[in-house]
């Protein structure tokens, strides 16, 4: 009987069942986050001009978000399946992928630190690569136009979106007249100030994701040891039972 990749249920499930459920829940959450990131980037690429430059090797922000989405999607999916089935081979695969993902994330953070990448550089690259729908959301929220202001449209053929205009209703004795005025402030400064003001929030979110990954590693290692111990115990019990049966037959 092949017991290299066992899946243990029944009596053993009472001992390690809660860990399996926690690991599965974390994996499902990571899978959903990965799907959201990949879905958002698919929408961005499908509705912007950056899709034509996708293979150019210059879309650093796009590649980073897609890579992060793939990491969460893959680790979440493998962890979901491995945690739900308690397969020893699946858990080992999940642990390897998770360790590789954490090492990649740490390497990316070190690369940003070595290259001395500032928040301004990330915002500029991100603004240049996202689609107009994302820019409209930011422009409506911060009441701004463009990254530096409407002057960046002066020497380009890009149309100015309606989100760059403020609509003013002028009521007269005869009729109500709607007029539009162009917003003069850029979105770069208020977006940076908003990120600085909410630094505690998004740093906490990143810390939660990192903590969940570390928790998954610890749970996965613990479950693997539990399964190995129980598998070894079952092997010993089966050998002892076969030995007793052979002894009984010989008598």
Image (spheres, helix red, strand yellow):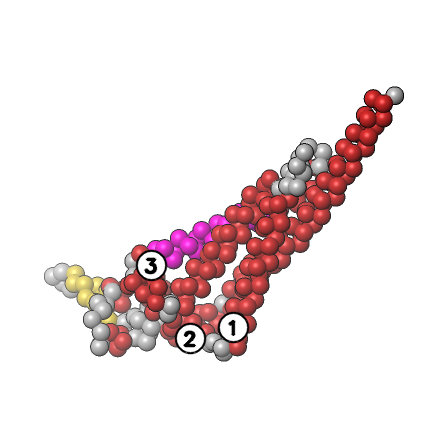
Other residues around mark 2 within 10 Å, as few (<14) / some (14–19) / many (≥20): few
From the viewer's perspective, is residue 4 above or below residue 39?
Answer: above
Q: Is residue 212 visible?
A: no
Magenta stretch: dominant SS? helix
Q: Position of residue 81 (x, y in %)?
A: 55, 43
The residue pinned by badge 2 equals: 121
From the viewer's perspective, is residue 50 above or below residue 250?
Answer: below
Tags 1 and 2 in contact by the CB under 8 Å rule? Answer: no
Q: Position of residue 55 (x, y in %)?
A: 35, 64
Nearer-N-terminus badge (3/2): 3
Q: Is residue 235 left or right of residue 74?
A: right
Q: Write the start and end of the magenta stretch as one range.
A: 23-43
| Secondary structure under the numbered disc 1 in the rendered image | helix
From the viewer's perspective, is residue 13 above or below residue 217?
Answer: above
Residue at 43%, 71% in the rendered image: 122
Q: Is residue 33 left or right of residue 10?
A: left
Taking depth in this image into account, of 141 and 192 the one nearest to the observer is: 192
The residue pinned by badge 3 equals: 45
Q: Is residue 58 left or right of residue 153?
A: right
Cα–Cα gap, marks 1 and 2: 14 Å
Cα–Cα gap, marks 3 and 2: 21 Å
The residue pinned by badge 1 equals: 111
Residue at 66%, 41% in the rendered image: 4
- Give residue 171's quadrant in the image: bottom left
Q: Quadrant of the C terminus?
A: top right
Cα–Cα gap, marks 1 and 3: 25 Å
Residue at 81%, 33% in the rendered image: 240
Q: Is residue 153 left or right of residue 173?
A: right
Nearer-N-terminus badge (1/3): 3
Q: Position of residue 243 (x, y in %)?
A: 82, 30
Q: Quadrant of the N terminus?
A: top right
Magenta segment includes 39: yes
């Amino acid at each position: 009987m092949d017991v290299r990749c066992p899946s243990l249920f029944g009596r053993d499930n009472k001992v390690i069942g809660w860990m399996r459920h926690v690991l599965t829940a974390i994996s499902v959450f990571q899978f959903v986050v990965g799907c959201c990131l990949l879905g958002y980037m698919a929408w961005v690429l499908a509705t912007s001009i950056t899709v034509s430059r996708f293979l150019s090797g210059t879309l650093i922000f796009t590649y980073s978000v897609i890579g992060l989405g793939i990491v969460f999607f893959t680790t979440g999916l493998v962890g979901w399946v491995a945690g739900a089935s308690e397969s020893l081979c699946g858990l080992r695969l999940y642990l390897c992928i998770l360790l590789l993902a954490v090492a990649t994330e740490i390497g990316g953070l070190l690369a940003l630190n070595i290259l001395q990448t500032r928040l301004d550089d990330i915002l500029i690259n991100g603004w240049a690569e996202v689609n107009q729908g994302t820019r409209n959301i930011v422009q409506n929220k911060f009441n701004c136009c463009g990254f530096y202001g409407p002057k960046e449209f002066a020497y380009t053929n890009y149309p100015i979106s309606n989100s760059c205009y403020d609509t003013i209703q002028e009521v007269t004795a005869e009729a109500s007249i709607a007029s539009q005025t162009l917003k003069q402030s850029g979105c770069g400064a208020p977006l940076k100030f908003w990120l600085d003001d909410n630094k505690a929030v998004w740093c906490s979110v990143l810390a939660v994701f990192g903590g969940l990954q570390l928790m998954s590693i610890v749970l996965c290692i613990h479950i693997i040891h539990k399964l190995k111990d129980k598998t070894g115990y079952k092997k010993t019990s089966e050998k002892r039972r076969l030995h007793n049966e052979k002894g009984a037959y010989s008598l």
